[in-house]
Image: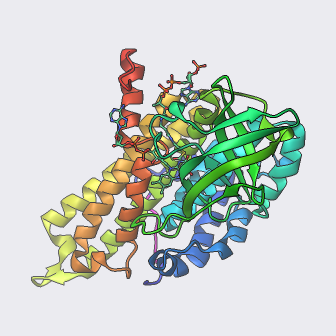
Amino acid sequence: MRPDLFEAPDYYQLDDLFSDEHLLVRDAARQWVKRDVSPIIEEYAQKAEFPKQILKGLAEIGAFGPYIPEEYGGAGLDQISYGLIMQEIERGDSGVRSTASVQSSLVMYPIFTYGTEEQRKKYLPKLATGELMGCFGLTEPDHGSNPGGMVTNFKDKGDHFLLNGAKLWISNSPFADIAVVWAKNEEGRIHGLLVERGMEGFSTPETHNKWSLRASATGELIFDNVKIPKENILPGKSGLGAPLGCLDSARYGIAWGAIGAAMDCYDTALRYAKERVQFGKPIAATQLQQKKLAEMITEITKAQLLAFRLGQLKNEGKATTAQISMAKRNNVEMAITIAREARQVLGGMGITGEYSIMRHMMNLESVLTYEGTHDIHLLITGADITGHQAFK
Ligand code: TGC
Ligand code: FAD
């Protein structure tokens, strides 16, 4: 892969709206990605391996629990800083951002929000440093968009719970130390359970042959009569709303993250178009390539403004699920469209691992689907504005 020459576009001077802390946090993440992610990520994606050596760096830039209070090991930052960190990481690779999203919003968030004080103290500081890594098990082989239909279940056996079932498509599962698992009790009510590696009957086989998110480890969670200590239940909230609450936080991060992938594709295409000469002039001087590039920067700018306003609403505790869905859906579609257009600007070179664009494009296919598919987010908006749920 070529040297990382990334220069971030800021067409509407958004930097003027960020605080000094936002800029500090963002620039630290940006430098780290340039130094520690860009030089190695293509190789790891090609060999379909998660680069575990970057976990320490992710923790150091505050990517594990950015908004978790410092007393629990988090960075104690606001939601805009969290978004900016996700943007910068996904500028490097969506799979790396996935690891950070899962650890922060799908593992630390539920422990912090629904856990006991003992659970917070036991797990959060180690999750913040990356000493412990986590994963989140909601999706099942027969229940993806409809997690409420899950069949994974646990029975009360007096001094412990007995967990049975399976989860599919779980980011980080092959190496996670703990899993936040959503399962139904005997009354059919959904609860979160903390399942630890090493518990008898618990296995995490890896999913192979992905063409997307190749630098992220994905796998299953299998529970075959796993004995769960009673203190491992998250008591603060039950029902489908508990896992969906975590998704709100992760989807918000993705709305920012996708901007990073789009910025990288745009920046690469712009630089290439200025340098590449055909018919005696740079292709950047042709109307067709200018149309592509001008539309890219327009869409990135709109997405930045959407994410920034959503960040303000999040900071004020006012962001709704439907607003988050709109931003996730819009920004991921924006990014994948830009990746496809940017790939064309590079002609044949666009399909090679010399440039990041094709990797971003393939990654974004997963981002379009996970954390609620493109269709589901449209239906969430539809339900919000009409008052009619069209899922069922
Ligand atoms: P529905 O009847 O609408 O709601 C059930 C209960 O949940 C409440 N609720 C929420 N609560 C908090 N936050 C939210 N976002 C909420 N959305 C709904 C709702 O009020 C209700 O509460 P109550 O008290 O009345 O029971 O549920 P439904 O079964 O009709 O489903 C709605 C639907 C389709 C929107 C939902 O199931 C959905 O979002 N499906 C998509 C599934 C999904 O996003 N899965 C993601 C899995 S994790 C993942 O992909 C990680 S990728 C990680 C990475 O690598 O980055
Ligand atoms: P399905 O739900 O079967 O959907 C198939 C198609 O049908 C989609 O196009 C969908 O939009 C459409 N569809 C479904 N319902 C409707 C409807 N009512 N109306 C119209 N169209 C509909 N899950 C986790 O729990 N934890 C993780 O860490 C995690 N990581 C993931 C990592 C990767 C790389 C991937 C690919 C997925 C991951 N997921 C994870 C799972 C992800 O959340 C699901 O793939 C996603 O929610 C969709 O579920 P599904 O794949 O079963 O598709």
Residue range highlighted in magenta: 5-9
What residue occupies the far top of the structure in this picture? 387
> In the displayed structure, would residue 247 be above or below residue 381?
below
Q: Residue at x 34, y 50 (%)?
A: 334
Image check: 239 left or right of 162?
left
Q: Residue at x 27, y 62 (%)?
A: 340
Q: Position of residue 255 (x, y in %)?
A: 48, 46
Q: Nearer the viewer, residue 204 or 239?
A: 204
> In the displayed structure, would residue 201 be above or below residue 240?
below
Q: Residue at x 42, y 62 (%)?
A: 363
Q: Nearer the viewer, residue 6 or 74?
A: 74
* Most common SS among magenta residues: loop
Q: Is residue 46 magenta?
A: no
Q: Quadrant of the N terminus?
A: bottom left
Q: Quadrant of the C terminus?
A: top left
Q: Position of residue 33 (x, y in %)?
A: 58, 70
